[in-house]
Amino acid sequence: MTAFLAVLAPEADPVVGPLRERWDPAAHRGLGAHITVRYPFLRLAELSTRDLEQLAAAAASVPGFRYRLARVSRFPATVFLDPEPAAPFAALRAAIEGVFAPRLPADRFPRYIPHLSIARNVRRGDGVVLDALETALSGGAISAHCREVALLERTGGPWRTRLRLPLG
């Protein structure tokens, strides 16, 4: 079983959902548009009542915030949208890691860069992805409001939201 924390971005799904369905394998596993806060994270079954209280307090220590998705960026094999501003996402991750760091599984990407993946595993042909994304964003930036962080789990089937933690 795999678990992670994310900010769900349903405002982005109407704009980039068809592109993610085509180019992001996570979309085929039931995962809508999102910005990962911490992957991997502890499974819900591994969290005690005290852990849940601390996780809720960590999330609540960060105020809810508005962000925009307009800037297209790339990792070597991933095309994504940068959330602006990025600082609240980093603050949310820091608050959670500040409580759980000693117990968290190793992060393959310890340098945190908040992003909303559109296409993964693309090296060649990313021009097609970029053109499609430019067309999708022709109506302007995607505006969103982060009010909570979600704990998601997957056991081989689709991703499921197991817990929602309100921000302050």
Image (spheres, rainbow, N blue to C red):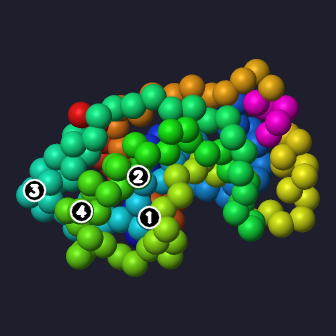
Q: CA distance from mark 1 to mark 2?
A: 13 Å
Q: CA distance from mark 4 to mark 3?
A: 18 Å
Residue 161, horizontal then vertical, whole percent: 39, 47
**On the image, numbered disc 2 is attached to which residue?**
90
**On the image, numbered disc 3 is attached to which residue?**
49
Q: CA distance from mark 4 to mark 1?
A: 15 Å
Assess disc 1: are there few (<14), some (14-19) or many (≥20) residues with their C-alpha within 10 Å of its C-alpha: some
**Residue at screen point 55% across, 38% down:** 84
Residue 155, horizontal then vertical, whole percent: 44, 65
**On the image, numbered disc 1 is attached to which residue?**
39
Q: Looking at the image, is mark 4 or mark 1 earlier in the sequence? A: 1
Q: Is residue 28 left or right of residue 44?
A: right
Q: Nearer the viewer, mark 4 or mark 3?
A: 4
Q: Nearer the viewer, mark 4 or mark 1?
A: 4
Give whichever of 44, 107 is nearer the camera. Answer: 107
**Residue at screen point 34% across, 49% down:** 92
Instruction: Give the quadrant of residue 19.
Output: top right
**Residue at screen point 65% across, 45% down:** 81
**What span is in magenta?**
133-137
Assess disc 4: are there few (<14), some (14-19) or many (≥20) residues with their C-alpha within 10 Å of its C-alpha: few
Q: Quadrant of the N terminus?
A: bottom left
Assess disc 3: are there few (<14), some (14-19) or many (≥20) residues with their C-alpha within 10 Å of its C-alpha: few
Instruction: Give the quadrant of residue 40.
Output: bottom left
| Residue type, numbered disc 4 | Gly
Residue 11, horizontal then vertical, whole percent: 56, 28
Q: Looking at the image, is mark 1 or mark 3 earlier in the sequence? A: 1
Q: Quadrant of the C terminus?
A: top left
Dominant secondary structure, magenta? helix
Q: CA distance from mark 4 to mark 2?
A: 12 Å
Give whichever of 22, 93 is nearer the camera. Answer: 93
| Residue type, numbered disc 2 | Ala
| Residue type, numbered disc 3 | Thr
